Amino acid sequence: MSACPDPSPAATSPTGSETPSPFLWSDPLRAGHFERWLAAQQAAQGLDLASLRMASADASFRRYFRIDSTHGSRIIMDAPPDKEDCAPFAHGAEVLAQAGLRVPQVLAWDRSQGFMLLQDLGPRTMMQALQVEQPQANLALYQQAIDALVLLQKASRPGVLPAFDRDTMLREMELFPQWYLTQHRGRAPDAAMRATLDTSFHAIADACLAWPTVFVHCDFMPRNLMLPVAGDPRVGVLDFQDALYGPITYDIGSLMRDAFLSWDEEFVLDITIRYWEKARAAGLPVGDDFGNFYRGVEWTGLQRHLRVTGIFARLTLRDGKPRYLADTPRFIAYMRATAARYRELKPLLRLLDQVEGIQEAGGYAFGRV
């Protein structure tokens, strides 16, 4: 998972300059490659090199600069090739653009060094515009988001994106015991815990695989959606390099069970129903029973929450990015709420409660965290 490149205060050099300098590069050799590549783009792209400034970094090893040009603002992606592969991003941009989504066009790309010059989709994310204390005030934004999701799914066809298959699902869920339980909590699973995890993981994978497959963004959430701009009413879509061909229930669950904020279940249901109705009208295979579809969203969401909880622990323990771990209680709450609803998942609920030191209560609600 990658958190999207939210605009953030520019990083500064020791002299107070807001332009990247060797101070911001851990590898002087790579800094030199970057400067030469950027200079080579100057004439063709109309770049103002003096305007170069930090835009953001994300949960991966990528970081982003913003630069002005005669054609408007541009984004530069710095993705070290020994740690990040830009090819899936370039492919995803092409696939999503063909589907009719507003995504950043790749204007220039140094494949060997991992530098990309991209169209800038604007300064503000959907996340930055949300009114978290007034859910209904955000209805128009979420409707735009589900319009984009339906558009993406309508373009789906096999053989274009990697398959979100059983092996992938199980491998992703293993991040939870590997990084969250063992490394973060210091609770290496014993035989009983391992049996519970194995049974639960296979049941979750079965539930996910029971749904028809479509294009799946895999991180479809407000931090990865940009506000519409003048002349284009569509939301912009970012961070699609991990897109797969998988369950139709996945992305709406990502949108409404966000990694960085939680909504009351009333609002979650409202938006999910609106999506389901639009998807049905568009001929997408979401079924005729909303209750069954919502169960699918919850089980698919559980697979995602196990994965992301492990990733957030790994970001802290391996990559030195502790701010993500602060959001893990949100995912534990999501997982406990879903596990409490279904009899097959009660052993997983007991495992979570044991690890978290939570006394079992008489009932659980989705609720806000």
Image (spheres, rainbow, N blue to C red):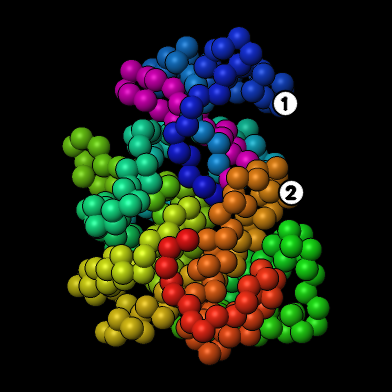
- The image position of residue 134, as x and y in percent, is 28, 53
Q: Is residue 219 visible?
A: no
What's the mark number on residue 318?
A: 2
Range of the magenta residues?
59-79
Hey, which quadrant is residue 297 in on the image? bottom left
- 67 lies left or right of 112: left
Give yes or no for residue 76 being in the magenta stretch: yes
Q: Residue at x 33, y 83 (%)?
A: 291
Give yes or no for residue 270 being in the magenta stretch: no
First in residue order: circle 1 vs circle 2 = 1
Q: Which residue is mark 1?
A: 27
- The secondary element bearing badge 2 is classed as loop
Kind of residue sitting beneath label 1: Asp
- The secondary element bearing badge 1 is classed as loop
State how far apart marks 1 and 2 are (Cα): 20 Å
Front position among marks 1 and 2: 2
Question: Local crowd at mark 1 within 10 Å, few (<14), some, or many (≥20)?
Answer: few
Q: Residue at x 37, y 42 (%)?
A: 128
Front one among 278 and 92: 278
